[in-house]
Amino acid sequence: MKEEFRARMLRIHVGESDKWKGKPMHEAIVAKCQELGIAGAIVYRGIEGYGTSTRIRHASHWKFSQDAPIMLSIIDKQEQIDKLLPHLDEMVDEGLIATSDVDVIRFFRSEEARPKA
């Protein structure tokens, strides 16, 4: 079965070394999304990039150098995204957040397993 609807997507760009209350920033954001019932969040670890600070961040094979660029992709209906934005204002000191409207096609096995949106 499938369901189609309009939604909002956030792409949050931070660094792997960024923290929120001692926890990796990307983990804290994913935890907040889950707490708020956001439909989906995924974290991507980049090879190289830079953002607002123009400092180039690299993924490294060395354990002592972990400052790869991180991108979170978060998708849900506008009402749910609106619940998340004030938390991101508080959490993200340095980074970039891009937003866009998206058309979502969600596939699921049966009516009983249909996610609540």
Image: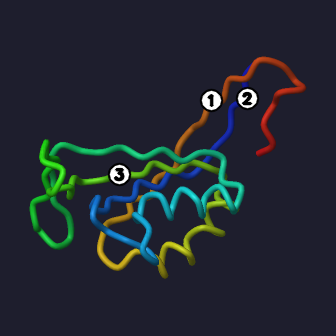
Q: Nearer the viewer, mark 2 or mark 3?
A: 3
Amino acid identity at mark 3? Met
The secondary structure type at the circle numbered 1 is strand
Q: Are marks 1 and 3 in contact (CB under 8 Å)?
A: no
Mark number displayed over residue 71: 3
Structural distance between the alpha carbons of marks 1 and 2: 6 Å
Residue 85's x, y, as percent?
55, 71
Q: Are marks 2 and 3 in contact (CB under 8 Å)?
A: no
Left or right: 24 in relation to 117: left
Q: With respect to residue 32, does 90 lie above or below?
A: below
Q: Are marks 1 and 2 in contact (CB under 8 Å)?
A: yes
Q: Residue at x 77, y 18 (%)?
A: 109
Q: Name the one closer to the observer, 36 or 22.
A: 22
Q: Residue at x 20, y 58 (%)?
A: 67
Q: Nearer the viewer, mark 1 or mark 3?
A: 3
Q: Residue at x 78, y 37 (%)?
A: 115
Say which label, 2 or 3, has the lower sequence index.
2
Tell me the residue that label 2 is attached to.
3
> In the rendered image, which quarter contains the C terminus?
top right
Amino acid identity at mark 1? Ile
Residue 97's x, y, as percent?
38, 64
Callout 3: few (<14), some (14-19), or many (20+) C-alpha neighbours within 10 Å? many
Tell me the residue that label 1 is attached to.
105
